[in-house]
């Protein structure tokens, strides 16, 4: 995580622009009402957006890297929306005010001589600033961009300006992204950054089993759900609070902590935003987030208490 800047209490912004980008996708420009600069950010960062209906969702920043006069995000209208994307598309208009928190970065962009970017659908949003950054570094790069149809793939006009380095794969006419083509650049030292649906990222995880360590970097929208039957009770010792909390199998660690009066920062409650990151002092966590890499999970020195649990009967946390 390369950037720790965060607005913890939230800040008011106004919707400066709402623009159609593709079938079912709009982009928003968010700026402070008085024109003050927003906090600095880096490619891979996201913000939490608190909508007027009280729903809070996470969106990747997809404007020019480091732009502080406004933030740009992209929002796809989800068929099974729980009030986030549906509100944005149906009710949000320029001039309305929102609250945002962040930015945070769980998808840090690292310098390299060459990159392969892989995105599908709205997964292009965190990749757009990375492409601009790679351009500014004069690095070699290519993008594989997929979607159900060309009409559903956002920011295509922006991407076409990069010429043949952008390879579009609308499934209805061209077919799926040819992941075997990534083998050669990955083995040659390219960093692979990817964002998209779970099926694509799962296929990339499988492909990367034979790649050098540290090659693949993923941004997930959702993490794998664990059936409650697989949960085990755990005792959580909060070192700073001097409290011990018994967490039953049918309750998350963060919910049990809150019931005991301990309230870590939290937002998504699904292991993707990073706000509830907690240091592990003793015990072995069972990681269920979509943020930590395999090596970071193996280190076992931190966890995200909204979704993760424990491999040991007892955890000591820095809470």
Image: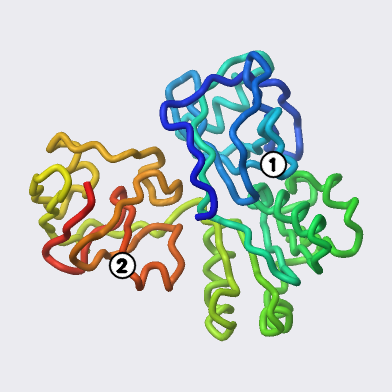
- Mark 2 packing: few (<14 Cα in 10 Å), some, or many (20+)? some
Where is residue 73, by image quadrant?
Answer: top right
- Tags 1 and 2 touching, CB below 8 Å: no
The residue at which mark 1 appears reads as 66
- Mark 1 or mark 2, which has the lower sequence index? 1
Q: Looking at the image, what colour scheme do you see?
A: rainbow
* Residue at x 31%, y 48% (from the top left corner): 306
Q: Which of the two marks, 1 or 2, is nearer to us in this view?
A: 1
* Residue at x 55%, y 56% (from the top left corner): 107
Residue 250, horizontal then vertical, whole percent: 17, 50
Say if residue 153 shows up in the picture: yes
Residue 239, horizontal then vertical, whole percent: 15, 50
Residue 40, horizontal then vertical, whole percent: 62, 38
In the structure shown, which secondary structural element does the residue marked by tag 1 occupy?
A: loop
In the structure shown, which secondary structural element does the residue marked by tag 2 occupy?
A: loop
In the displayed structure, would residue 153 be above or below residue 168? above
Residue 181, horizontal then vertical, whole percent: 73, 78
* Residue at x 59%, y 19% (from the top left corner): 91
The residue at which mark 2 appears reads as 300
Where is residue 15, by image quadrant?
Answer: top right
Horizontally, residue 294 falls left or right of residue 218, namely left
Horizontally, residue 205 falls left or right of residue 55, namely right
- Mark 1 packing: few (<14 Cα in 10 Å), some, or many (20+)? some
């Amino acid at each position: 995580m390369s950037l720790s800047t965060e607005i913890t209490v939230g800040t008011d912004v106004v919707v400066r622009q709402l623009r159609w980008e593709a079938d079912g996708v709009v982009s928003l420009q968010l700026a402070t009402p008085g024109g003050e600069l927003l906090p600095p950010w880096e490619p891979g960062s996201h913000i939490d957006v608190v909508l007027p209906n009280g729903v809070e969702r996470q969106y990747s920043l997809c404007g020019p890297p480091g732009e502080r006069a406004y933030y740009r995000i992209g929002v796809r209208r989800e068929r099974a929306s729980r009030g986030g994307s549906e509100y944005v598309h149906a009710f949000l208009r320029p001039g309305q005010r929102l609250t945002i928190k962040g930015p945070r970065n769980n998808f840090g962009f690292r310098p390299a001589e060459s990159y392969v970017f892989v995105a599908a659908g709205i997964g292009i949003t965190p990749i757009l600033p990375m492409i601009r950054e790679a351009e500014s570094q004069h690095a070699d790069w290519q993008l594989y961009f997929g979607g159900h149809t060309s009409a559903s793939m956002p920011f295509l006009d922006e991407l076409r300006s990069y010429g043949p380095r952008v390879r579009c794969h609308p499934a209805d006419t061209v077919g799926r992204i040819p992941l075997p083509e990534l083998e050669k650049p990955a083995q040659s030292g390219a960093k692979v950054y990817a964002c998209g649906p779970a099926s694509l990222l799962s296929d990339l995880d499988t492909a990367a089993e034979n790649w050098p360590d540290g090659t693949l970097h993923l941004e997930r929208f959702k993490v794998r759900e664990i059936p409650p039957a697989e949960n085990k009770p755990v005792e959580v010792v909060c070192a700073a609070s001097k409290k011990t909390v018994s967490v039953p199998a049918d309750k998350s660690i963060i919910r049990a902590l809150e019931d005991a009066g301990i309230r870590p920062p939290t937002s998504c409650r699904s292991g993707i935003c990073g706000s509830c990151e907690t240091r592990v002092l003793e015990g072995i966590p069972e990681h269920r987030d979509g943020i930590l890499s395999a090596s970071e999970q193996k280190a076992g020195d931190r966890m995200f208490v909204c979704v993760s649990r424990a491999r040991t009967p007892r955890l000591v946390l820095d809470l």
